[in-house]
């Protein structure tokens, strides 16, 4: 999908919205698989976002300053005998972007409803 | 459909990730690989459903992401300067076509057969042990279960006249010795290959001592494992928990037991040692766990290296820690290393008479590396070349 200047593509917006929602529920940091799982649940899809698409989008959001990331403490995966997780967190700019994305989505729904009024 | 297909699909994802991160800067490359590895681990742990559904899910996430992977690679390659804009169009078309064809081929394979999918994994190669033998085979072989079980000592001997005797040897250890892989790099196989031990007596038609870079014993043992134990293996590269060996101090100062060697080259000394060894038995070890010139001593709780690279030291540490150690010190040249620590657990029973004593209150290996060498081990994950045991059978009694 071609990007319009200053705008997020739908997946990026969805990640910001999903991350903000997770934050409100008490999960500030998330890893790639976790956000993919939540995105799939919210959109009622069984298939998670593809690896290449997901991690490219996370990288772009980080480059835009909407996400920050770090590797988790290496002792944790060593103790649990699993690979280390890259943890992402929504920045203040990311929260603004999430609000904007939610507003835009709501406005789109309203426009659609106005164009197609419900007939009784 | 079996777990093999899931492993194959996961290997395909890993292989593709390795391919689409190749030639990129190490930090970018390792980050993407580690993130996908973590994602794979979470997927395999969390996603239920039937095996075909899991396999299809992994493959779908792989294939649907390929356009973004390519776009991402090009972005990163341009930033890193490994790709010029002029060559972009031609390269992109070529790579894209190759990937699509390769993917179609891989998916079209009959993965219900016991075969590994090897399309995109550069480090993954199917291997038949029998094909590796370079002509040297045992003519007479006796393989019997050892009645004492694993309580006894393991002993292997190579005698003149092509005779090989292994007493009380678990097959996992024999596979490791034959393929020269440390324990942490040997994966899979049933439990009995570690718990059951065998006595093997075999005779080849020629001498089994290594000569001219050839290792006839290993070739003969590969054939023996293939014939008598029906061993099938393959090698691949996996992302596994590992350690980075790094300099601990910000001022890069070494610890007291890490000293730059005055030697710059060990080739002449090692050639002399090899010439001496060819004429008779190896020299006895030096007292106190000292390393001979350009050599090493690896005892229980003692490690000494003379004029070794830190890459070699990392390999020795890998065996001690049973986990891959990557040399990330950035230090070149040769070093003398002396490391003493308290093994955990302490070895049962008395030490051999010529072994250096163990201080029961000494530091752990991790602490010793930091305090004595000024280096530190950081947990990480990284690519490790492993040998995977696909199948192995108990031998027919003879």
Image (tube, coloured by chain):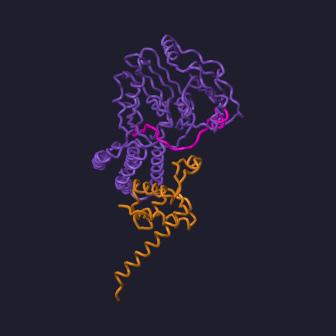
Chain colours: A orange, B purple
Quarter of the figure with residue B94: top left
What is the magenta segment's predominant secondary structure? Answer: strand
In this image, B57 relative to B152: left or right?
left
Q: Is residue B383 magenta?
A: yes
Of B217 and B243, nearer the camera is B243
Residue at the farthest right position: B361
Please provide the residue range marked out in magenta: B366-392
Residue furthest to the bottom? A120
Q: Count the marks.
A: 0
Left or right side of B73 for A27: right
Q: Residue at x 48, y 69 (%)?
A: A100
Q: Position of residue B246 (x, y in %)?
A: 58, 37
Q: Nearer the viewer, residue B27 or B327?
A: B27
Q: Nearer the viewer, residue B220 or B62?
A: B62
Residue B347 in sight here: no
Tell me: B341 left or right of A13.
Answer: right
Residue B88 placement (x, y as % from top left): 32, 46
Direction from residue B391 to residue B106 in the image, left or right: left
Q: Is residue B119 magenta?
A: no
In the rendering, at what x and y percent does residue B207 appear? Answer: 41, 16
Residue B123 quadrant: top left
Q: Is residue B295 above or below residue A95?
A: above
Q: Position of residue B48 (x, y in %)?
A: 43, 58
Residue B20, compared with residue B156, is above or below; it is below
Quadrant the C terminus of chain B occupies = top left
State whether residue A25 is above or below residue B273. Answer: below
């Amino acid at each position: 999908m071609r990007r319009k200047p200053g705008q997020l593509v739908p997946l990026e917006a969805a990640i910001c919205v999903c991350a903000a929602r997770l934050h409100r529920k008490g999960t500030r940091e998330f890893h790639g698989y976790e956000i993919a799982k939540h995105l799939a649940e919210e959109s009622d899809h069984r298939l998670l976002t593809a690896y290449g698409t997901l991690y490219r989008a996370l990288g772009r959001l980080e480059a835009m300053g909407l996400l920050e990331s770090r590797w988790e403490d290496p002792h944790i995966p060593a103790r649990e005998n699993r690979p280390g997780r890259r943890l992402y967190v929504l920045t203040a700019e990311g929260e603004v972007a999430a609000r904007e994305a939610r507003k835009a989505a709501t406005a789109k729904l309203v426009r659609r409803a106005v164009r197609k009024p419900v007939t009784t | 459909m079996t777990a093999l297909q899931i492993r194959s699909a996961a290997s395909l994802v890993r292989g593709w990730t390795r391919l689409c991160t190749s030639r990129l800067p190490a930090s970018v490359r390792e980050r993407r690989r580690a993130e996908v590895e973590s994602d794979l681990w979470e997927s395999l742990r969390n996603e239920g459903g039937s095996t075909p559904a899991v396999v299809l899910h992994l493959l779908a996430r792989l294939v649907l992401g390929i356009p973004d992977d390519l776009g991402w690679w090009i972005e990163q390659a341009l930033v890193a300067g490994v790709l010029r804009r002029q060559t972009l169009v031609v390269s992109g078309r070529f790579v894209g076509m190759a990937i699509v064809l390769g993917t179609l081929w891989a998916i079209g394979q009959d993965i219900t057969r016991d075969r590994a999918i090897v399309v995109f994994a550069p480090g993954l190669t199917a291997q038949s042990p029998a094909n590796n033998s370079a002509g040297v085979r045992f003519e007479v072989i006796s393989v019997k279960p050892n009645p004492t079980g694993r309580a006894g000592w393991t002993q292997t001997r190579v005698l003149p006249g092509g005779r090989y005797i292994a007493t009380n040897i678990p097959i996992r250890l024999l596979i490791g010795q034959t393929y020269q892989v440390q324990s942490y790099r040997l994966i899979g196989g049933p439990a009995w290959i570690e718990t059951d031990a065998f006595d093997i007596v075999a005779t080849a038609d020629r001498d089994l001592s290594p000569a001219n870079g050839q290792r006839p014993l290993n070739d003969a043992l590969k054939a023996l494992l293939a014939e008598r134990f029906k061993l099938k293996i393959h090698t691949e590269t996996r992302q596994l928990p590992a350690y980075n060996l790094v300099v601990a101090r910000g001022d890069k100062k070494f610890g007291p037991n890490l000293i730059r060697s005055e030697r710059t080259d060990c080739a002449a000394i090692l050639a002399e040692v090899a010439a001496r060894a060819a004429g008779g038995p190896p020299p006895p070890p030096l007292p106190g766990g000292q390393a001979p010139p350009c050599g090493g001593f690896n005892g229980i709780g003692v490690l000494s290296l003379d004029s070794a690279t830190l890459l070699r030291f990392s390999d020795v540490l890998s065996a001690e820690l049973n986990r891959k150690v990557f040399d990330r010190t950035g230090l070149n040249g040769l070093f003398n290393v002396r490391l003493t620590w308290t093994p955990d657990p302490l070895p049962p029973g008395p030490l051999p008479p010529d072994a250096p004593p163990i201080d029961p209150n000494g530091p752990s290996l991790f602490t010793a590396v930091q305090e004595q060498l000024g280096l530190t081990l950081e947990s990480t994950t990284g690519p490790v070349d492993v040998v995977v045991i696909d199948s192995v059978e108990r031998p027919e009694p003879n």
